[in-house]
Image (cartoon, rainbow, N blue to C red):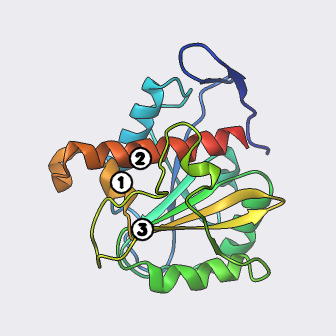
Amino acid sequence: MQLKKFILTLPIYLIFISATAQQLALLKYKGGGDWYANRRTSLPNLIAYARTLGFTLEPDQAVVESDSPEIFQYPYVHMTGHGRVYFDEADVKNLRRYLESGGFLHIDDNYGMDTYIRKEIRKIFPDIELKELPADFELFHNFFDFPQGLPKIHEHDGKRPQAFGIFIDDRLVLLYTYETDLGDGWESYEIHHDPPEKREQALKMGINILYYVFTH
């Protein structure tokens, strides 16, 4: 199954029109980590915000397992958590095939995932280097402008926020965001009590990611 194609029109906002609305998905993975960490409000809030800007999306998120063929139904898959991640051989083959076929995986470290996820990314792409994205990369300037690159949402260890990517034929197919925690910024105010400007930054960065997915 191939990902549905988008047709781009240009009224007040850039609007994505397809035969049916697209659905975004949250990745359920093995290893014991809390893949469900932000399940209640994070991706649903990003979807709701995207819909106000004209993105044709289903209002609810799906949950898809890393070895499931159903992953090919979703143009964007979000992955988060705090702990251990493990991809077995079936996961690795399925995820690589999905990404080579036009899919997009966004991994957002919820704090504590970094030690594990870098090893698992290398399993999927042993032949492709995970590279840091510079501040002038188009992902940070396509729908909203982020002159400094990836915004800092949560402090964690106080390190600078970094975005890393895997490219296939000059297309970013895997995005790993570290020391920012966009997903927490997408959550409803009562979860983390982030100030409005931080939540707005996180949501706008999320829109830039979706815009890149739907135009590449």
What is the x, y in percent for residue 73? 67, 45
Question: Which image quarter: residue 46?
Answer: top left
What is the x, y in percent for residue 53? 47, 25
Q: How far apart are marks 1 and 3 (CA)?
A: 22 Å
Q: Is mark 3 on a helix, strand or loop?
A: loop
Tag 1 near tag 3, CB within 8 Å: no
Reading the chain from its start, which is encountered first: label 1 or label 3? 1
Q: Mark 2 or 1, which is nearer the eye?
A: 2
Q: What element carries label 1?
A: loop
Nearest the camera: 152 or 189?
A: 152
Q: Is mark 2 on a helix, strand or loop?
A: helix
Name the image quarter holding the N terminus. top right
Amino acid at dot 1: Arg
What is the x, y in percent for residue 199? 29, 46
Residue 39 is tagged as 1
Task: For label 3, count other residues whose C-alpha is less than 10 Å away and answer few (under 14), some (14-19) or many (20+).
Answer: some
Tag 2 near tag 1, CB within 8 Å: yes
Q: Name the residue under label 2.
A: 43
Nearest the camera: 6 or 12?
A: 12
Nearest the camera: 87 or 48?
A: 48
Q: Mark 2 or 3, which is nearer the eye?
A: 3
Task: For label 1, count other residues whose C-alpha is less than 10 Å away and answer few (under 14), some (14-19) or many (20+).
Answer: some
Amino acid at dot 3: Pro
Q: In this view, does 143 lie to the left or right of 41?
A: right
Residue 206 higher or lower than 159, as above or below:
above
Q: Residue at x 52, y 60 (%)?
A: 27
What is the x, y in percent for residue 13? 54, 20
Q: Mark 3 points at which residue?
A: 161
Residue 77 visible in the snapshot: yes
